[in-house]
Image (cartoon, helix red, strand yellow):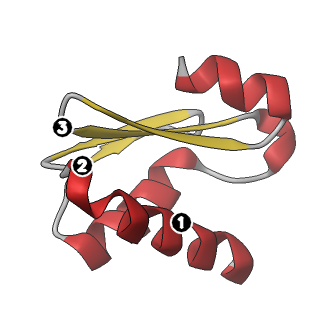
Amino acid sequence: LAAAVAERIQGLAALLLDGRLVVAVAPAAGLHAGNVLKDLAASSGLRGGGNAALAQAGGALPDQLDRYRSMLERLLRES
């Protein structure tokens, strides 16, 4: 689902699903999903990884969704 959204918007999509944070990136976005997730995980205590198109981390908490979103926005502004 995240990959379909990322491709449709030609950007990055992040979903929280069953305790996993999933990040997908369309090729046109010029980002690497695994690196984005790695940076987010380092700041939030999550663990995971992935490739250029799709990455996921376990241990994501629904009550931290706003925090994850803010961190992703900051990472995107800095890249």
Q: Which of marks 2 and 3 is in front?
A: 2
Q: How far apart are marks 1 and 3 (CA)?
A: 17 Å
Q: Which residue position holds label 1? A: 72
Q: Nearer the viewer, mark 1 or mark 2?
A: 2
Percent x, y of residue 22: 40, 37
Q: Which of 79 and 71 is in front in this view?
A: 71
Query: Which of marks 2 and 1 precedes in the sequence?
Result: 2
Q: Which residue is drawn at 51% across and 73% down?
A: 70
Numbered tag placed on residue 19 in the rendering: 3
Looking at the rendered structure, the secondary structure element under dot 2 is helix
Q: In this view, does 10 lie to the left or right of 65?
A: right
Percent x, y of residue 39: 41, 70
Task: Please rate how many residues cluster around mark 2, counting C-alpha atoms within 10 Å: few if below 14, some from 14 to 19, many from 20.
Answer: some
Q: Identify residue type, mark 2.
A: Pro
Q: Is residue 44 left or right of residue 21?
A: left
Q: Identify residue type, mark 1.
A: Leu
Q: Which residue position holds label 2? A: 62
**Location of residue 49 by image quarter:** top left
